[in-house]
């Protein structure tokens, strides 16, 4: 990371200080009862490196306005930058060194360091991405960052800051990947997404780690008046993964949506804690997460719609559905509501089920082999989320990964 200005060094020091004063997480806290904090190494020094392996081949075949690859969290300049005038795509450490006002105004504003995961990321992030789109500008092609772990370090920490000014539009992809590693690597990522009045942002988080990675991810979006923000989280890889997307409707007419798809196999443990918070009247949110799991995998979904006083006219939904493919797999779904305002429309639904025997019988009676029938049912189950992913190459990539897990 390039030399940072005094204000940034002071923020990092404050975050480091918080790590020494905040109480340690024990796993007995209500918010941590499903995923052991020790699995994510949220305390203590950085873990030892397990040993380096080759980085996976670069993914993402479609056209991009810019690409940025951060191997083991090391800073790198964006490649192939083709963006309209005024748009900034930069490595976040370089943006700090330039003392960009937009960074100083927004960094740590949504994900600060008042809890241990936030403090750890703020104190130790190595590199990251800044995307700034000025008022009224549209970036037609996606901007993509790949955070890659090779096992050369025991911890990989990245950060993303996206700022869309009034009326701007963009798609940003944060991809996480590695080969199977010989030991454990801890990953921490934080994405702060500012979507100002009338702007539109689609942010995709693709978690495709190999074996050995344990990842804590935070995504927080603030959506202004008549703005639209969509978070899409696709979780397929890693040993232990906990993702925390929070969508904040901060202005009247805000539209915030959180979509997620996950498939866990082997002994994988995935937890998604998804929150929509309505802080203004006449706002809309929709949380839709679907998951499949097999072998002895364990998945957890916690969803919460929060409507504090002063947000009448809220229209909010959350749905989580899980398809269990093996007797040893377990899915927990916990939909939740916190409503403190009258004149709202909110609903939640959570379901855990197995492949319907009648569906299998129907397909078998028409000559479809059992394995093919199960694959067709699972692929049909995940389409509700996949069909809302705008980029065809990403849909095809995720479909291939899901099919590989079904073999």
Image: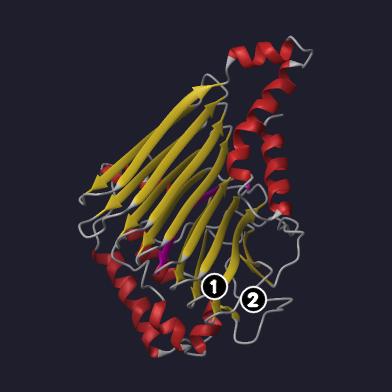
Location of residue 340 with respect to 289 vertically, above or below: below
- What residue is pinned by disc 1? 127
Q: Is residue 260 visible?
A: yes
Main secondary structure along the magenta-highlighted residues: strand
User: Residue at point 26% right, 58% down?
Assistant: 311
Residue 240 lies in the magenta stretch: no
Q: Quadrant of residue 204?
A: bottom right
Residue count near mark 2 (Cα–Cα under 10 Å), binned few <14, some 14–19, many ≥20: some
Viewer-closest of 87 and 316: 316
Assess whether mark 2 and mark 1 are in contact (beta carbons under 8 angstroms). Answer: yes
Residue count near mark 1 (Cα–Cα under 10 Å), binned few <14, some 14–19, many ≥20: many
Viewer-closest of 199 and 10: 199
Residue 154 location in percent, x, y? Answer: 53, 58
- What residue is pinned by disc 2? 76
Residue 56 location in percent, x, y? Answer: 72, 55
What is the image's colouring? secondary structure
Viewer-closest of 289 and 113: 289
Q: Secondary structure at mark 1?
A: strand
Furthest residue to the right? Answer: 367
Location of residue 91 with respect to 191 vertically, above or below: below
Q: Which residues are magenta?
A: 210-224
């Amino acid at each position: 990371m390039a030399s940072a200005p005094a204000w940034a060094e002071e923020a990092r020091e404050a975050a480091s200080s918080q790590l020494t004063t905040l109480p340690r997480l024990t796993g007995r806290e209500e918010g941590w009862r499903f995923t052991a904090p020790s699995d994510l190494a949220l305390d203590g020094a950085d873990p030892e490196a397990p040993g380096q392996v080759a980085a996976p081949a670069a993914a993402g075949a479609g056209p991009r306005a810019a690409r940025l690859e951060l191997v083991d969290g090391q800073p790198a300049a964006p490649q192939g930058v083709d963006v309209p005038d005024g748009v900034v795509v930069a490595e976040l450490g370089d943006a700090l060194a330039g003392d960009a006002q937009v960074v100083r105004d927004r960094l740590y504003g949504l994900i600060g360091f008042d809890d241990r995961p936030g403090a750890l990321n703020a104190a130790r992030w190595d590199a990251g991405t800044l995307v700034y789109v000025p008022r009224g500008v549209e970036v037609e092609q996606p901007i993509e960052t790949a955070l890659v772990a090779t096992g050369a370090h025991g911890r990989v920490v990245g950060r993303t800051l996206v700022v869309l000014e009034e009326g701007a539009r963009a798609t940003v992809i944060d991809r996480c990947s590695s080969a199977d590693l010989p030991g454990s690597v801890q990953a921490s990522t934080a994405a702060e997404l500012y979507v100002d009045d009338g702007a539109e942002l689609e942010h995709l988080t693709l978690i495709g780690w190999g074996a050995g990675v344990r990842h804590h991810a935070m995504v927080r979006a603030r959506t202004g008046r008549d703005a639209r923000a969509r978070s899409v989280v696709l979780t397929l890889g890693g040993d232990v993964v906990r993702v925390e997307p929070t969508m904040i409707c901060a202005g009247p007419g805000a539209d915030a949506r959180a979509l997620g798809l996950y498939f866990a196999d082997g002994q994988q443990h995935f937890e998604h804690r998804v929150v929509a918070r309505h802080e203004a009247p006449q706002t809309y949110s929709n949380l839709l997460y679907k998951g499949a799991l097999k072998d002895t995998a364990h998945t957890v979904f916690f969803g919460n719609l929060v409507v504090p006083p002063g947000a009448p006219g809220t229209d909010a939904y959350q749905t989580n559905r899980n398809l269990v493919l093996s007797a040893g797999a377990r899915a927990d779904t916990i939909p939740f509501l916190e409503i403190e305002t009258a004149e709202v429309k909110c609903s939640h639904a959570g379901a855990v089920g197995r492949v319907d025997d009648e569906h299998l019988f129907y397909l078998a009676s028409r000559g479809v082999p059992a394995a093919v029938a199960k694959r067709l049912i699972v692929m049909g189950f995940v389409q509700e989320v996949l069909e809302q992913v705008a980029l065809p190459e990403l849909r095809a990539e995720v479909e291939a990964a899901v099919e590989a897990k079904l073999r």
